[in-house]
Image (cartoon, grey):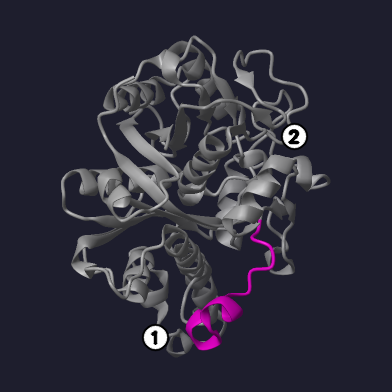
Amino acid sequence: MTIRADIAVTGLGLVTPAGVGVERNWSEVCRARGTAAALDPELDGVPVSLACRVPDFDAEALLGGRRAHRLDRFVQFALVAAHEALADSGLDPATWDGARVGVVLGNAGAGLQTYEGQHRVMLDQKPQRVTPLLLAMYLPNMMAGQVAIEFGATGPNLVVATACASGNTAIATACDLLALGRCDVVLTGGSEAMVTPLTMSGFANMGALSTRNDAPESASRPFDADRDGFVAGEGAGLLVLERAGDARARGARIRARIVGHGSTADAHHITAPHPDGRGLEQAMRLALADAGAAPADVSYVNAHGTSTPLNDLAEARTLRRVLPAGPLVSSTKGVTGHLLGAAGAIEAAYTVLALENGLVPPTANLRTRDPEIDIDVAATPIRHDIELALSNSMGFGGQNAVLALSRA
């Protein structure tokens, strides 16, 4: 296998329904217990009453009370994850050249909690009571802007939106900035906080969500015969990327390498994937070609695996066609639910951890595999020598983004 790109992952930060921090996340994901629970009282009346929320997240303690109140939840998540990722990388923002540091993040819904809350203020009180910070809290680019302000990163700064593929699209964009020499360091990943009354009602009314209100912890069950929809989640995943040569020169720990990526569009339907996964197939083949790798080189796939009937079947068919040798496959959404625009980022981080630990994380709640799904889905943690892994993401609108990652 010939590696053509050489981008190093030197830092990870995670804030997810599995917990705050990388170590806690990996432990919980490998325990394979679903995190979905009943919705908060303020979401009473929403047709589906379960979601995966970040536990014990105290924004005031983590960011400071006055500051936390000026940030939407999706930005709070991103900042906390960024702090962990930078500490993990060993980089010191006080000594770096900020003009060579980029921030590229993915997001689908922006500050919906702020937007919906302030809309209620306008309707229930009067327009003059709407906070003057509305746009500064709501706009999607504010996530990257706030991270840049926090660490003095004055290089390229952007937020990308490809729905549920946004996290992977952001990471791919960051890799390109490094490969082109536009940056020396990029903070990349995604964040999402879309568990709000309006969003949950929309997802529920279109039939996308699981309706297992009586057993939320087992509702997200990717590739299972009885899956009935995804469970919405929230959180953030941040990665610090550098060119591998630069990372080695400063004596950094390289956790894994991103060696290829591919992005495509189905051009098929606004929400449903192509039934045969043709767009995903092309993205996977592009990622492998970018890595200079053959399908037989892949030993693990972190699947998009949302627990919806259409997505899981289309992805499974694609995996079988592109990777006939049958690598191990798992979806960590059985634990975390679907973090939408942040999903690809946290799953890329989990893939890094799988490569590091030689361990395929399990697919929680997989009890009876769908007989139409003919792939090797891991239902328990499996020790496995992983050299090359793929991490798949698919989004509403037909966007597909695939990352190829290798062991350091």
Q: Quadrant of residue 407?
A: top left
The three-letter amino acid code for the residue at tag 2 is Asn
In the figure, 259 relative to 67: above or below?
Answer: above
The three-letter amino acid code for the residue at tag 1 is Pro
Residue placed at 58% from the left, 45% from the top? 338
Where is residue 350 drawn, in percent x and y? 54, 43
- Regarding residue 177, the answer to whether it shows in the image is yes
Q: Residues within 10 Å of mark 2 (few under 14, many from 20)?
A: many
Lateral position of residue 242 relative to residue 132, left or right: left
Lateral position of residue 175 relative to residue 382, left or right: left
Confirm whether the magenta stretch covers residue 172.
Answer: no
Identify the secondary structure beneath mark 2. Answer: loop
Mark 1 → mark 2, Cα distance in angstroms: 45 Å
Where is residue 241 drawn, in percent x and y? 34, 51
In the picture of the structure, the residue carrying the numbered disc 1 is 132
Task: Please state, as top left, top right, bottom left or bottom right, where the C terminus lies in the image.
Answer: top left
